[in-house]
Amino acid sequence: MAALASKDNRIGYLMAVLGCMVVTVSLVALTRWFDLANVVMLYLLVIVFISVRFGRAPGIFAALLSVISFDLFFVDPKLSFSVSDVQYLVTFAVMIVVSLIINNLAVGLRFQAQNARRREQQAISMSHLAQSLSAARKNEEIINQAIIWLTKHIASKALIAMPNADGKLTVVSESSIPSEFNWNVTQWVFDHKESAGLATHTLAANPMHYRALATSSQVLAVLALMPTDIDNFNQPEQQRTLDVAIAQITLALERVYYAKVAQNALIKVESERLRGSLLSALSHDIRTPITVLSSLAACLASQNLAPAEQKQLAIDIEQQANVIQRLVINILDYVALQSGGMKLNKQWVSLEEIIGSNIRQLEPYLQNRQIKIDVASAVDFIYTDELILARILNNLLTNAINYTSDDATITIQATLTNQHNTRNLQNNKTLQSYQITVTDNGQGLPLGMEAHIFERFTRGDSESNTTGLGLGLVLSRDLVQHLGGTLSASNIQPHGAQFVIVLPWQPLGNLDIFDDKFTSNTTQIDTSIVANITTNIATSSENS
Amino acid sequence: MKTILIIEDEAHIARFIKSAMEQEGYQVYAADSSQRGLIEAASRRPDLLILDLGLPDADGCDVISDIRAWSSLPILVLSARSDEQDKIKALNLGADDYLVKPFSMGELIARVNAQMRRWQAGYEAPVVLALGNVSIDLAQRQVKKNGEDIHLTPIEYRLLTVLIKNAEKVMTHQQLLNEVWGKGHNHQEHYVRIFMSNLRQKLEDNPSRPSYFFTEIGVGYKLHIPKS
């Protein structure tokens, strides 16, 4: 700085000399037209210029030079200093004062301009901090952004410690914790909400500066930093900057905290609402068959009925009991699924068996309905949870039976499909999936309800006498999702409903079929049809 | 007259089963706890046991283990709807069949009758039998369907013989793995599924809706030999 100043000064002196020379030479030639007073003005101009541009010393030098030149070249007797020239000492004094004033103003202006620029820079960096904090959605992001900013502008090292789920202070940091960091001071700051360490009144010997990031109600975190410039750090300006930064970081942390609180509240409200609607829907769905049940039983017990009528009543009673049983099973499964109590047990299972055992179970209710089964050999065996898929199919088949007439046709199809959707196109591969379709030719879904049929507790016919449809479909969809798939419904022409289950595919390569007991050499698995594989097993096991 | 012992703590259910079984021509004794049940079993020596798994004073599975120590009488288990694991455990310990509550009385009667048919004093598996239009001759190792020879691989044949030997009994995947493939094949149920699928394809008229080779989903398989 000093070297530069003196270089600037040297130039300044030079320019002063030059300036005076220029004025003197140009005006000497023009004396007959210029009054002395105006000559002084021009010298003043030189002084002002030098003072503004080159500082105090060159400015004073210029003043001196100007007075000397003026006296020498313009005041009679020319080219000499005489006693009567003493008055020009006043001129000299005035010129110096002017020079000093101009100089001070110039310096002051420059200083203020510098200040303004510096403050602008700070304001910009603050706004950067604010912007990066507002974009952050999680505590980790906030802390990351804060530390980046702090280490860029104020500190050489910075850490933020937050209480974890157990209330213990932990540091969220990608890099290692510096040795100067002190847990005890951090805990103290957290407990007392006061700053400590370097440049404070508490534990000032500590190499790091600790601040509490606190709102009026709680301490959210503790900031520890090591300033890059300790002397500058003590300046009120830096402290103010730090205060503003801390306020912003605290605000951001508070925002995330309250967002979490709001989300938890929403979840509570939602689950309360769900419980409420579940209870009210079930209240109707359970009361109806129970009412019917007790009426039928009372009827059976009280009146003198013919054996045929008695038998019919008994059959009806059994049917109502089954309805209630199905409902209770659905409720239990639904609750188990919601509370995360349903573990997946995925294995290679036989679709034929799942379909077959369902039909066997529903045999008494089929009446004259035709069941068509069409399972492609590629999906003879699929990788999924057997019991859950059986439940889903049970629900769908029960619905198909309940919503069709005695002689309807129900078709169950299963194939392997190539799914093209945006997700797969992004991965640049076609994903295969298992597709199971249950179709009937009954009354179909109510028009306009196709999209809503899976919404909680809607029922096709609101006052229909087939109860539990709403829960059954919601449960089915949730179960399919639990398996990692999707369930959709639509109407078909001329009339009927179609439910499509799509499940994630697993390559047969995962099927652990070959081991030492069967073959002497493991064979490459053909991932096409299972029939090939089972034949291979059969022939190879024959040879062993 | 054949005798049945019911160990069931629910009085209503015990009563219903008793009256239904008596109508079928069986003599029925009932006990409402495992302790009493074991005493009755030892003294009455019934031909069949209907056991509720959810007894108040003991785990039904312990009753099965106790009785299996000295008797191979058919045990039919009643369970409330719960984990498949309970049923599998009961079957692995020696139970022959199970029904889930609430069950239809018709189903219970059918299964009891099937078990009674199978278990006679000195029961031996049939050597020649017919499953509809499939005829099986174990002595000759011949299986015919509609008069035509059906080729079964060694494992399929072994599976068939195990099922015949245990007809009307629900065999768990683990039991079938042990009997057909030998011990040491844990959690490889898909082996059993694949070969059962083969048997159904070869021997059933409608493999998707079998008449003889029944699947108990999540539990195992049962061969049903119809009354001839």
Image: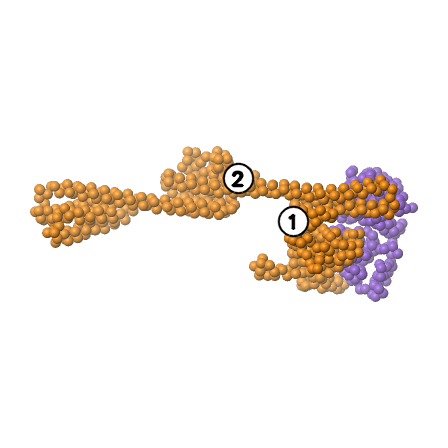
- The residue that label 2 is drawn on is A163
The answer for how far apart the CA atoms under marks 2 and 1 are is: 40 Å
Picture coordinates of residue A542, whole percent (x, y) = 76, 63
Residue drawn where x is 11% and y is 41% of the image: A86
Q: Secondary structure at mark 1?
A: loop
- The residue that label 1 is drawn on is A455
* Numbered label tally: 2
- Do marks 2 and 1 both belong to one polypeptide chain? yes
Residue drawn where x is 42% and y is 46% of the image: A127
Q: Nearer the viewer, residue A530 or A334?
A: A334
Q: Residues within 10 Å of mark 1 (few under 14, many from 20)?
A: some
Picture coordinates of residue A318, whole percent (x, y) = 80, 46
Identify the hue of chain A: orange
Q: Secondary structure at mark 2?
A: strand
Residue drawn where x is 19% and y is 43% of the image: A96
> Taking B220 as reference, is A240 left or right?
left
Say which label, 2 or 1, has the lower sequence index.
2
> Taking A180 as reference, is A338 left or right?
right
Q: Nearer the viewer, residue B221 or B228?
A: B228
